[in-house]
Every structure is written in structure tokens, then in C-alpha cells.
Image (cartoon, helix red, strand yellow):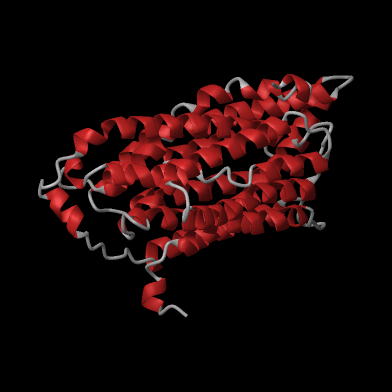
Amino acid sequence: MLPLGTLRKRIEPVVLCAQIASAFFDTGLQMVVKEQCAIATDALNPTPTEDSRQKAMSNFYMIYNMLSKFVPILPAIILSKVSDLGYRKIPIVIPLVGYLVSRVVLLLVIVMDLPIQAMFGGVVVHGLSGGFCSYWAGVMALVSLTSTEEDRSLHMMQMELVYGIAGLIGSLVSGHLFQLYSVDFKQGTVLVSLSVFLYFVCLVYTMFIFLMPTVSPSAQERNETNGIDTQYSKNILNILLLFAGGILFDVAVGGGMEILVTFEMKEPLNWNATQVGYGNAAGFLVFLTSFLGVMVMSRWVSDVTLIIIGMVSFAAGIYFMAFVTATYMFYLARALTLFALIPMPTIRALLSKQVNGSSYGEFYNTSSIIQIIQLSLVLLPPSLVLLLPSLVLLPPSLVL
């Protein structure tokens, strides 16, 4: 068992608790959006159709996702600069405040029967606090600072594993919790209330309990800071290629996942809350299989080969997903993506190895490149999200 002092220096409890809360929120939001869009569509159209309900959902998620991706750009850049000045907690604490506020807004939508458009205000507050981009960049910066260059890929994958296990647990129970209600509490109240409570616990832990770990730079990093290592210019091509690969892959993954959110809610699947939770859990199970894949395959293949394997795995799964017409086929397609989460942590780790400390000045170090790639990956996917929701209205065979 870890001593209390050592445990207080671990960021894993925050990641675990926050991701369980996020899984609760995601399931709750999907079901609330489905219900409210159906009610609004039925009130406006004398003969509502499944396509009209689906169009209302797609329009909501298009605006919601655009706000969640564009609004955090400038705040996240500012928070990353503050972090580089030595305030490592700030990029984690401020986004947690935004998470808490946005989850409270969903709770108010359920309890007070507010229109679902109120969630746009919640996501703007969430974005102005830096959003997931700033939060995850802050977490990965801590991982980068407290790991050596040799084992950085493994440590990053371990953090992704904690994230995935938490999402898996939260998703498995979220559907059942959503259906809990009584005379005094509406359906979804218990689930979203738990999400709010868990984010509050994360915020208190990060602010008052978590201790920043002491960073002891390696000899190589000290040499780089003193200007001994001058190979940075030779790494520019590698950095550009890694950025390009990471951004393009993130566009593909982000676009595919945005389609699935609304595709699950319409025919031929038309899932209820429990099935939505199980479907989300299948996605988080990929974190575990990807971690095991890195653990096993990294002994025999290079990081570049691992990235290619992960990309091929995702491409095969999302291609098969275009032909899904039944629930069992959905899970078969998910099974093909078992290594789909290997590329991004590996790319981050490779990038952190390519950039020398001396290239960032006195206050910059390997954590900066982790934040830079996180901020870069939020720029391009929104343009694709604009087009993808409309594709959900087409037959699966035409999505290709």
C-alpha cells in the first residue's frame, strides 16, 4: 500500500473519479437529448417521423460539439502558458470548475424542465475554462515531467488505461442509474447528481489534497538546457510528420465517434439508456486492449509500427461500422478497433522525445510539447464535425 505522502502526489485518483463522472454525464446527456428532441419535434409536426427526430438530435449535437471544440482554443493556450510558468495545477483545476458548472446545467435541465438549448450555455462555460484539451494536456504534462524518456510511452499508456477503466465502469452502471427515479426525482436526476458530486470531489482533491511531485531533470535534460545538445534542427521533419499523422488520425477518430453518438439512438439500433451505457463501455474497453497491446508488442516492434497497427485497427473497425444494422454487429465492429487507441499516446511520447528543453527557453520543457499537440488536435476536427451529423440520416450503406 502506498504511503499517504506518495498517494497525494498521484494524479490517477483525479483521472479515475473525473472519468466515471464524465461517463455518467455522457449517458445522461444522450438520453435527455433524445427525449427532449422527440418531444419538441412531436409538438411542431403533426405527423413526426424518425428522420425528423433524428435531424433535431443531429442539429443539437452539431452545435454542441462545435462549441465544445472551438471555445476552449484560446483559454487552453493561455492556461498552457500559465502552466509553463510553473503553476502546474492551474490547467487541471480550472477545467474541473468548468466541468462542474456544465454538469450542474444538465441537472437543472432535468429538474427544472429547462429547454435542452440551455446546455449550450453550459458547454460555453466549460470551453472558457479550457475544456478537455487543457485538462488532459495538464495531466499528460505531469506524466511527462515525472517519467524518463525510456518509459514515457508506457507511463502515458498507463494513464490512458486508468482513463479507460474508469470510463468502462462508469458506462456499465450509467444506464441503470439513469432509469432510477421516484415521485420526487425525475429519470436521470440520480445519475447526473452523482456526476456533479464526483466532479466536486475531484476539484476539492486537486486543490487541497494533491501535491505536485518533485521533478528531478535527467542529465540529458540538464545538458539540453545548458545548450550542449544542438540536434533540435534535425528533428523538425520528424515533428512535422508526427503532428500531421496525429491530427489526421484524430480527425478520423473524432468524426467517426460523432456519428456513433446519434446513430445509436435511431433505427436500426434505437438503444435505450442501458444499451447506450453498454455501448459506451465497449468503447472504453479499447483502452484496456490497447494498453495490453502496447505491453506485449512493444517488446518486438518499434513505436512507429505500433502507431501503424493502431491506425489499421481503427480503420477496419470504422469501415465495418458503416454496415451495422443490428446490435451484435455493432459489438463486432467495436472488436476490430481493439488497438485503436495506441497511436495517440505513442505519438505524444515520440514528440516529447523529439523536442529538447533548450528549444523552449527558461520556463519550457518536455511538458510543453504535450500541451502543444493537445491544443493542435482540437483545431481541425471541428471542421469535419460540421458535415458528419447529416450523414447519420443516410442509410448505413451510403455513409461510405
Q: Nearer the viewer, residue 37 or 219?
A: 219
Residue 84, given in percent of the width and then of the height, sits at 25, 47
Residue 49, given in percent of the width and then of the height, sits at 85, 22
Q: Nearer the viewer, residue 61 or 197?
A: 61
Asked whether residue 20 is in view, the answer is no
Q: Quadrant of the C terminus?
A: top right
Residue 117, given in percent of the width and then of the height, sits at 63, 32
Residue 69, given in percent of the width and then of the height, sits at 49, 32
Q: Is residue 70 above or below residue 88?
A: above
Asked whether residue 133 is in view, the answer is yes
Q: Residue at x 53, y 60 (%)?
A: 16
Please tell me how many numbered marks the rendered image carries. Answer: 0
Q: Residue at x 43, y 46 (%)?
A: 302
Q: Is residue 229 above or below residue 119?
A: below
Q: Quadrant of residue 57?
A: top right
Q: Nearer the viewer, residue 326 or 298?
A: 298
Extreme-front residue of the structure: 300
Q: Residue at x 34, y 56 (%)?
A: 150
Image side of residue 153 versus residue 60, left or right:
left
Image side of residue 151 versus residue 131, left or right:
left
Q: Residue at x 37, y 49 (%)?
A: 91
Image side of residue 317 versus residue 231, left or right:
right
